[in-house]
Amino acid sequence: SAVISQKPSRDICQRGTSLTIQCQVDSQVTMMFWYRQQPGQSLTLIATANQGSEATYESGFVIDKFPISRPNLTFSTLTVSNMSPEDSSIYLCSVLDEKLFFGSGTQLSVL
Amino acid sequence: GNSVTQMEGPVTLSEEAFLTINCTYTATGYPSLFWYVQYPGEGLQLLLKATKADDKGSNKGFEATYRKETTSFHLEKGSVQVSDSAVYFCALRVDPGGYQKVTFGIGTKLQVIP
């Protein structure tokens, strides 16, 4: 089973700034995913990040707002750019290694 | 589109009580159904699954039966423990190869008190 280290676990940020969330996996995986869980809502897929290709974004999410890097098979980052209070949420990375595994999440609060 | 509706929490139970967390779904095609659990400070992890109608998924004393006629996948446990305190997510996936199309419910927080 894959073990995922996600950081930071939480952060409080000012409006207009950017935050980069890191996701490190203890094994090589092809498919990595980034989710968002807004207060009182279900997990929503932001994008799929495969190594060696551009990330694939879901409807309602754009690369300028949520740029993703996937430099190798064990690491990915998600940046939340030009933040506003509406971006306050939990962000989760996930990998597919026979089944889905999740990081512990990043609790982001934007003031 | 696909959707999952699960009861809102928190659900507070005494130790050894019976647990039911309701989950209903709407989906095109024939979904696989899942329950994920998130313990405090940890990532979501798969608890159990069922891939076709009338299948029963089970793990750690938890059970859920895939009911196509009622489009439900309720989670049950006969006797909860304090260690079961966590957030439980119901989820579905329609395309067997499309792991990116997993649809989640909002999660139900369970608190078990001694």
Image (cartoon, rainbow, N blue to C red):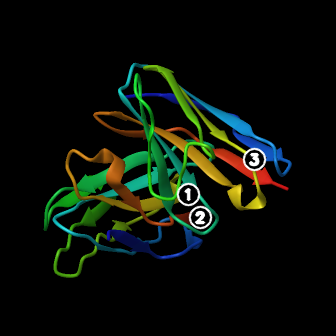
Tag 1, which chain?
B
Q: Residue at x 57, y 42 (%)?
A: B42
In the displayed orientation, state which residue is furthest to the bottom.
B70
Label number found at residue B85: 1
The chain letter under disc 3 is A
Residue B114: x, y in percent?
61, 62
Judged from the image, the secondary structure of the residue bearing numbered disc 1 is loop
Q: Name the kind of residue labelled 3 in the image.
A: Asn
**Which residue is depicted at the point 77% across and 56% down?**
A84
Amino acid at pointer 2: Gln
Position in image of residue A99 (x %, y %): 31, 39
State which quarter of the image contains the C terminus of chain A: bottom right
The one of A17 and B21 positioned closer to us in this rendering: A17
Q: Which residue is mark 2?
A: B111
Q: Residues within 10 Å of mark 3 (few under 14, many from 20)?
A: some
Q: CA distance from mark 3 to mark 1?
A: 36 Å
Tag 1 near tag 2, CB within 8 Å: yes
Of marks 1 and 2, which one's residue comes earlier in the chain? 1
What residue is shown at x 64% (from left), y 65% (from top)?
Answer: A39
Residue for badge 3: A82
Look at label 1 and name its amino acid.
Ser
**Dot 2 falls on which chain?**
B
